[in-house]
Amino acid sequence: MALTFTSSEALVRFQERGVQTPPSATCSGELDGPLGPRWPARSGSIYLALLCAGPVASCLRLETRRSLHRVGFALRGGHEPLASGPRTRSERPAGQCQGAGQCRGAVQAEAALLSPVRSPSLAQAPFRPRTPVRPLLPRLFGGPGGHLRPLDLLAEAVPADGVRTARARGAWGFRLSAAAPRALSFPASRMFSRCDLFPEEFSIVVTLQVPGLPPKKNEYVFTVTAGDGALLLGLRCAPGRLHLLFAGAGAWQTRVAFGGLALTDGRWHTLVLAVSGASFSLTVDCGLPVDITADVPFPATLSVRGAWFFIGSRRRTKGLFTGLMRQLVLVPGSDATPQLCPSKDAALAVLSIPPALQDLAGKPEDNEVLKYRYETSLKVTLGSQPRCSKLEDAQFWFDAVRKGLYLCVGSKWISVLAAKEKLDYVEEHQSLVTSSETLGVEVFAIPEVGLFVATANRKATSAVYKWTDGRFVLYQSIPTNQAQSWRHFTIGKKIFLAVANFGANRKGQEFSVIYKWSRRKLKFAPYQRIATHSARDWEAFQVDGEHFLAVANHREGDNHNIGSVIYKWDPRSRLFAANQTIATAGAYDWEFFTAGPFAFLAVANAFNGTSTRVLSHLYVRLLGSFQLFQSFPTFGAADWEVFRIGERLFLAVANSHSYDVEMQVQKDSYLINSVIYELNVTAQTFVKFQDIPTCSALDWEFFSVGEDYFLVVANSFDGKTFSVNSIIYRWQGYEGFVAVHSLPTLGCRDWEAFHTAAGSFLLYSSAKEPLSRVLRLRTR
């Protein structure tokens, strides 16, 4: 129906902040919306198109008898059609406003009532019909239906050269984290050219896929920031929660939190967040809405003059949205849920998605070779293994040697297409000359620096070697005292290397040392000394975000029954401090692993002072400390190795010697079975899986080639000679591990498996000669 009214009737009054509209202003207009015979029984929005004569302002308030609602006005001179996009001052037509509240000639104003009218009795108001102005409505609201046009924030932010796209669960989305935070932004004036106040009532529609987030991490879906960087409005996701942030009175910031949400499950979800004063409603995948009434309402006059929209960030690197985003729409007015729901696919309900994603929607499912725009930005790197970090996320690397295609995910290269390799034979690749016999080796990588190996040498100097041009080259010498082993670990960005010293220093003091990597000098420097007793091994691990180091103290003087100590990292002092002492008998090795929510620590006990037939123990962490879980009969246990094959969990112990002071030494006491145990989940205990004959075994190493799994044992002595073969066993399912390769070794003490761009390798150390060997695994 068409209406006319004047301000003198006191039905409608126009007010401009700071400028009063004269009573002589006369407007005629048309009410369009859910008005009709059923209007008293419904609520909704009323839309006005007004034709006004006289001075009116660009941003006014419309006050009815029962409620106050904000209206945005766009002024145009005469009756010319509205032009799309903002205009400069020089482009204003004749008769348009020249100053605040001053217009010459007839001025046409189009207004959109942004808040729903709560009172159903407006139909009873004594309006007088006049000529309707129906042609104004489609231009103002985007269509004859009278609904406010959705504002596609995502399409507005995507630059002309595109943003990297990715496909997940059959739908395409933008990977915003691949672009710089400021690249996906635009000034608020591009959306709010007619009025610089953000709608008091609005809905946000977003379709996204959020990866698993660590605790206490927030990622921003979008933000609106002022010119000085202050946050005016923002939407962010966290594990199990969604936060709406907005600027309140003064410098205060208000947060409305929706909890108990399963958004970080890697699936697509469509959210509709409706805001109306102090009422906030969230609908996920067209389900039941979650309503919150906040103590602080959304501000009625939130100015966005000079503000900027940032999509997927808060204008900085911290808080970048790392998932996929398919839809982000601002709908001025009331709840937009009825425009999307019900839907056949509620998780991907569409209101407005960018054209770039619409072009990809028709891609054939069975032809992944076809190239579309926005896909051409994907790069495949050839040659040696490149760096994999956030900057290279979702990039591909093709390894021509191993004939594999890899995808950078997080900080790791994940194989997506590889030829099925089979281990064919083993050949010697390098003889690594060391300063003395080597009792242990540790292979590790330092990001952006390279691959290294640390050797624990019997005499006064150990060394660190760097992989250079396909071989290990001496990089740094480190003074040690009968070093037994090294352990590499990290705490945050700090990189450490701990050595287990078996002997005393020149002053007769027994210390093991932790070294820290210097990013400036590119060397390891002493960081902390810890008193130990004939230390054999270090084990570094993390439980519930806390970092620990466990040392295996072998003996103190002639006493082998002493305590081994677990140290805990103190973030305040940035040092390790003793946390728990566990009684051990000639401890040789620690091994940490997890099973489900539980953390375990296994110790290899080798000698109790009279016999090597001692129990080695497995501990589980409960109530803040490690408590005994299971005991295993062992014979001079020198090493534990934990490994998984599919869903099965195994523990292998290396038995070195069967000896008792009451028994006469026998030559065959070194020919003894080492044992593999498997976790029986039903019985909640490890049970024997397989006995493997070994010759004074000192170490197990688990590795894989292609889809095959292997174990290699360090056989050191057969009772007659140290020149014995170490064996590679292959997993053959029901048969268990079967010997497949016999490798000549001399006093073999430790094995390490590692991979480079050139292929896969094994490294073993010798306790009987100053020579370690690098073996290459040839595949077919």
Image: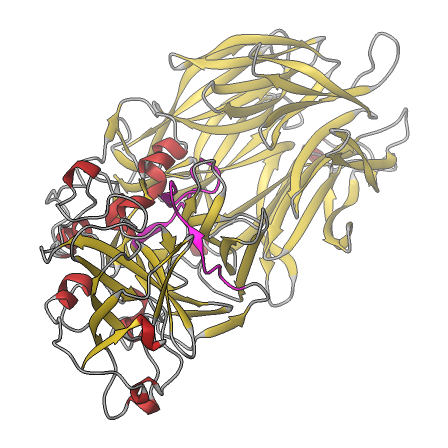
Report x, y in % for residue 595: 60, 54
Residue placed at 62% from the left, 57% from the top? 597
Q: Nearer the viewer, residue 73 or 266?
A: 73
Identify the residue at image location x=77%, y=51%: 624
Which residue is nearer to you in this view: 62 or 342? 62
- Using the rendered view, name the quadrant where residue 418 is placed: top left
- Indicate whether 510 appears above or below 612: above
Instruction: Give the prevailing secondary structure in the magenta stretch.
Output: loop
Residue 482 placement (x, y as % from top left): 74, 15
Q: Residue at x 16, y 53 (%)?
A: 105
Residue range in magenta is 297-326
Quadrant occupied by the N terminus: bottom left
Tell me where residue 296 sits by quadrant.
bottom right
Does the stretch in magenta take in 564? no
The question of residue 315 being in magenta is answered with yes
Comparing 302 with 723, the one in front is: 302
Q: Position of residue 639 (x, y in %)?
A: 66, 36
Is 426 left or right of 250, judged from the image as shown?
A: left
The percent position of residue 199, horizontal first and vertical second, equals 37, 60
Q: Is residue 73 left or right of residue 364?
A: right
Say how many tags the image has: 0
